[in-house]
Structure formats: C-alpha cells, structure tokens
Image (cartoon, grey):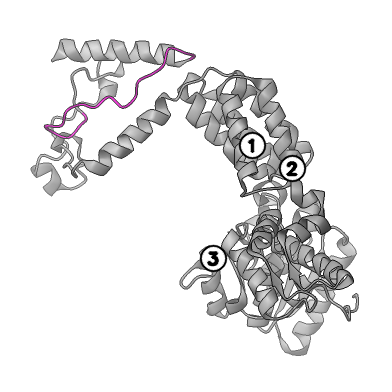
Amino acid sequence: MAKPSSHPPLAERLRPKSLGEVIGQQHLLGNGLPLRIAFESGEPHSCILWGPPGVGKTTIARLMASSFDAHFITISAVLGGVKDIREAVEQAGIWQAQGGRRTIVFVDEVHRFNKSQQDAFLPHVESGLFTFIGATTENPSFEVNSALLSRAVVYVLQPLTEADLQQIVARVLAEHALPAIESIADEAVSRLVAYADGDARRLLNTLESLSVAARAEKITAVTDDWLLKVLGERLRRYDKGGEQFYDTISALHKSVRGSDPDAALYWFMRMLDGGAEPRYMARRLVRMASEDIGLADPRALRMALDAAEVYERLGSPEGELALAQCVVYLAVAPKSNAVYKAFNEAKAFIKQDGTRPVPLHLRNAPTKLMKELDYGKHYRYAHDEADGFAAGENYFPEGMAVPHFYRPVNRGLEIRIAEKLHELKQRNHQKN
C-alpha cells in the first residue's frame, strides 16, 4: 500500500469528511432519499456507484466506511488484478477473526475487471465477509456481471451543477486552501465552472495549477483575462454555458433541420473539438430526432438512442463515430415537426382548460359498485370491431369540441399516416 503523500493534492485535501460537507447528489443524499437512508440505517449494503468522473463516487464510499466504522480497502481495477482481490479477502478474514469489525472493499473503475475477476467477489459478498462497493463511469448493465449486479444496489450519480461547482470554488477561497489566491473574479469563476463540466476533480486540479502560476507571478487576484493567459487554449476554446457554445449547438440543430449533412458534421466536430461533453451531444441528437423528424421517420429516434447507447459502451473516441453517424442520418431524414407542434398545442390547451370528467364508458370498472354505477358501460372494444376500429366512438370528455392537435406533414411516413387518419375520419362521419 502506497504511503500517503506529505503534500496531497487539493482534491484530496478538500474531500468531505462528513455527509454534511458533500456538495451535489442531493437526489440521493437528501433527507429521506436512498443513500441518506442507507447511511442512517447503520447496516452497510453492497452497491454500485455509477456516474461520470469527479462527482463523488470515492468520497461516498469512504464516508460509508467511516459512518459504519468499517475497515476500508481500495482496489483499482485499472492497476489491480486477482492478486489484489485475494489480499483483500485475506485481510477481511483477519479483521473478522480479530473482532468482527466490518470491511468495505471499494473497487474503483470496476468495469475494467473481466468476468472472472468480478466473479471472484461473489462468494465473499454472499457470505458477508465484506461489503462490496463498485464505482464505474460505464453503464453497469453492460459492464458488470449480472450475478454481481443482482447482489448490489445501483445508485446513479449526476454531474455536479454549476451552482455546486461555484460552491466548491467558494469553499476553496473561504478555507484558504490555495494561499497564493485570495480572490477570483466572477467571470473567471464562470469560465472555470464551464470548463469543469460537472467534474469537481477537474475543477480542483485546474485551480491547483492556477495557484502554481499565481505564486510564480505573485498574483493574488485572478481575473478572467489572466486566467485565459495562463490556461490558454483549453479554456479559450471551451465555452460551455457561454454564448459561443449555445450559438454552435444552435448551428448544429439548424443544419440538421435544414437537411445539410456536411454542415451538421462540421458543427458537430466543432463542438467535440471545443470540449463539449459527448453525452450532452447525444441528448441533443435524441431531442432533434423527436422535434424535427418525428413520425416522418420513426427510425431516427431509435438511431439516436442507439448512438447514445454505443457511446456509453465505448466512450471516447470510439463511440463518437456512432454519434457522427446519427448526425448524418438525422440530417438526411425526412423532416416533420407535427408531433412537436401537437405536443405544445395540447400542453397549452390543458393548461387553460378545466379538468373535465372522464366519460363513464371510458372508465375502468374493477368493482361491483363501479359496474352498478355504469362505469365502462357501452364501451366498444376496438379489437372486436371491423378492421379493429370502432367507427363513431368518442374518446373525449362529453361536450368538448374535438381539437386537432396532430396535423401530419406531406413528407416521409407521415404521408401514409395522414391517409390513414383521413380514412378513419371519413368512417367516423359515415357512422355519425
């Protein structure tokens, strides 16, 4: 085991010592929420912490060990192997024999272990020799053995928000963790937070390198101009959250909408080159598939979801090719915003309209009383009707004018959808 450094990095010095010091992950750590309950239960359980880098996976694992007064063994799946697992098992056995004190085995980057290495934990997790905690940046469904996965609770950690990262900067300054720096201008904080992109470790490492430069130049107040001068191109080009970032994603979206695959690829690569998070790009592509293509080509949404899944499995740079393939497909696909417009119109209608009662014939009747009150009476089961369509049936509240939110465009599959809807409308008119 390596000796702790006499000069630990800033990220280590500022690592929270209690749950109250943890910034972010309140969807898990807030009062009455899953991880908070786990801490308060007094009984550790095996779990997998899944989330991007620098969001607190190791911190939470260490706090669990502290909270449960457990021995803490760390294994890096990047550097370790079966030998490390055996040593952890032996050590846990010794501690158990000496006094029954719990042991937590924390495996960082657990997805890097192969099947046999992951299987080596199973008998000891089942026997209760130790509690297993795995940390991974990859989807556990793909990267963790089903047997191990079934014995662990998966907690999904989120990237830290801008407010979370700003709070970390404020803590660094308040605790004088970087003696060379007394203040950081608001514009510089915003740029640092944007560059960190939800990663606390990245933020703290950047602050530490900034401190070294400040000490050398005898700078105590960090301005945005000085920040750009010192950290150079990596901050200048990456402007997530700034005007240039949103202008660029706008250009990508409009190029896809405009059916120009070359322009779409250009702006897509501009964003990746500028440091945009590929997962963010994947989310935007899914949105484009729904907003601008919709039912003109339903395969587009599946393509976007597949590309996002491929990226989760492969990461960068391999997974970026799948995203690029999706960009091209979306650009050349037939376009329709009919569903997008229908969604917005229905949303606006519901907001201003009253709460109308569900007609009796559409209500479910699971009890005798409900049947006696005519719940479900006169409902026509469409599958029993000609062509599976109950012509003339009304599915809206009584007395409500029939709205027409969805209006298919004359492109792609929506041409056939429009023809089908016209036919059904005609049959309704004939029945009525």
Q: Where is residue 310 in the image (x, y as percent from the top left)?
A: 69, 37
Point out the tag, 1 or 3, that comes first from the N-terminus. 3
Q: Is residue 19 above or below residue 250?
A: below
The kind of secondary structure element at disc 1 is helix
Viewer-nearest of discs 3 and 2: 2
Q: Mark 1 points at which residue?
A: 248
CA distance for labels 3 and 2: 32 Å
Residue in front for this viewpoint, 226 or 246: 226
Place of residue 237 in the rendered image (x, y in percent of width and height, measured from the top left): 75, 45
| Residue nearer the viewer, 92 or 419 | 419
**Is residue 136 rendered magenta in the image?**
no
Lower position in the chain sequence, tag 3 or tag 2 = 3
Magenta range is 395-412
* Amino acid at pointer 3: Leu
Judging from the image, what secondary structure is the residue with disc 3 in? helix
Q: Which SS class for mark 2?
A: loop
Give the residue displayed 74% in from the left and 32% down from the top: 321
- Dominant secondary structure of the magenta stretch? loop
The total of numbered circles placed on residues is: 3
- Residue linked to disc 3: 28
Crowd band around label 1 with a 10 angstrom C-alpha radius: few (<14), some (14–19), many (20+): some
Distance from the alpha carbon under mark 1 to that under mark 2:
10 Å
Please state which amino acid type lies under the numbered disc 1.
Thr
Q: Where is residue 189 in the image (x, y as percent from the top left)?
A: 66, 62
